[in-house]
Image (tube, rainbow, N blue to C red):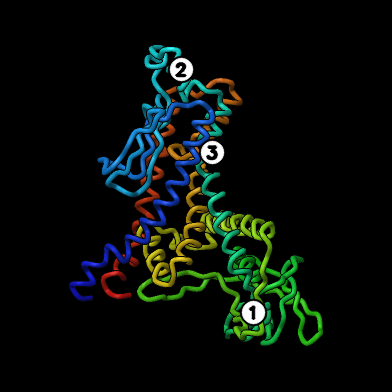
Amino acid sequence: MDFLQYLLLPFTKILPFLVVLTVVVFVHEMGHFLVARWCGVAVRTFSIGFGKEIWGFNDRQGTRWRLAWIPLGGYVKFMDDENAASVPTRESIDAMTPEQRAGSFHAKPVWKRAAVVAAGPIANFLLAILIFALWFSIFGVRSTEARIAEVMPDTPAARAGFQANDLIVGIDGASIKSFEDVQKIVSTHVGRPLAFAIDRAGAKLELVATPELREQTVGTQKMSTVVIGIRRSDTAASIPVYQPGPLESLGLGVEQTKFIITSTLGYLGDVIGGRQKADQLGGPARIGDIAAKVADKSVIDLVYLIGFISVSVGLINLFPIPLLDGGHLLFYAIEAVRRKPLSEGAQEIGFRIGFAVVVMLMIFATFNDLPVIRGWFTGG
């Protein structure tokens, strides 16, 4: 890599990542902001990024809209936010005037607080659904016939007796309409036997194959992929394009969002169960690398990636870890059952544990990102 490439590295690798992250974060925080305003909560700050302000302005309701120097997230700060738990001290509550209480987040009923917190992830899901729906509406649905072009040797498919030209019509009782349907099911069933309904020159067969994990090297990076060992036909005749209407496109957008959620949860379950490796858990560098490669291909594909990342950010924020939106919702659920909030001490302990968990996950993700970063400087 020459000197000019080193100089351009921040722009070619980091800029597409910042574009993706800024859009996703803005929509997430806008969800919090809009529902907070609707619930009568006074919003003090709407920030994209952390740290010192680069640029900002105050709106007519007193909210400071700001862009900050560290573009790795954002936040909406309410009038009475004093700590990570968004809970003011008892002394500050008692010192509030009636007008301040009216705009206080903490003084709102628990369902309103839960609505404000849940609005961020929900906004991410809605953004993804909209992006996917527009994608299907504009470009149509391109699907490949679930016909096998080649069976790879020494794979689950070869051992199960699959043959070239077999047509997969069902898996575990579910109807298969395309090769993409096969990929979706196989990718979420590593180590679990699947019953494939096969049409072989008009004859109906059932073959059982167990997807397995195979390690592949792409450039300098090693990736684990769930496979059964078949390749599809890529001839033009096997790839018809279907153009759905607006409502059907919206439904397909919902289905795509649902698939990303279920496959992500399935992958995490497989990691916990020891069926998959955790090497696919990446951080900013991996996302930036993917965004840069997608941006090199086309801006349109980068928009699709924004939808994918938006789903992931929304889902992660719903994990019941104190410090994340899901942790707040967990505390509100406990409050709704107990009819009173947890003590300040209990919440403080919870958020300290949550902070430790988040930091450990960030360190682990950064460790997984090291091969990606190394590849930037070695051309891999």
Mark 1 vs mark 3, foreground winner is 1
- Residue drawn at (57%, 73%) of the image: 227
Residue type pointed to by label 2: Arg
Q: Which mark is residue 101?
A: 2
Mark with earlier residue (2, 3): 2
Query: Disc 2 to disc 1, how far (Cα)?
Result: 61 Å
Residue that carries the numbered disc 1 in the rendered image = 239
Query: Disc 1 to disc 3, how far (Cα)?
Result: 40 Å
In this rendering, is residue 42 above or below 165?
above
Name the foreground residue: 279 vs 119.
119
Name the foreground residue: 329 vs 138.
138
Q: Quadrant of the C terminus?
A: bottom left
Residue type pointed to by label 3: Ala
- Residue drawn at (40%, 50%) of the image: 361
Residue that carries the numbered disc 3 in the rendered image = 118
- Secondary structure of the residue carrying tag 3 is helix
Residue 303: % across, % down:
47, 61
Name the foreground residue: 363 vs 110.
110
Q: Quadrant of the N terminus?
A: bottom left
- Residue drawn at (71%, 83%) of the image: 166
Residue 279: % across, % down:
43, 62
In this rendering, is residue 168 above or below 281?
below
Residue 66: % across, % down:
33, 40
Q: Quadrant of residue 151?
A: bottom right
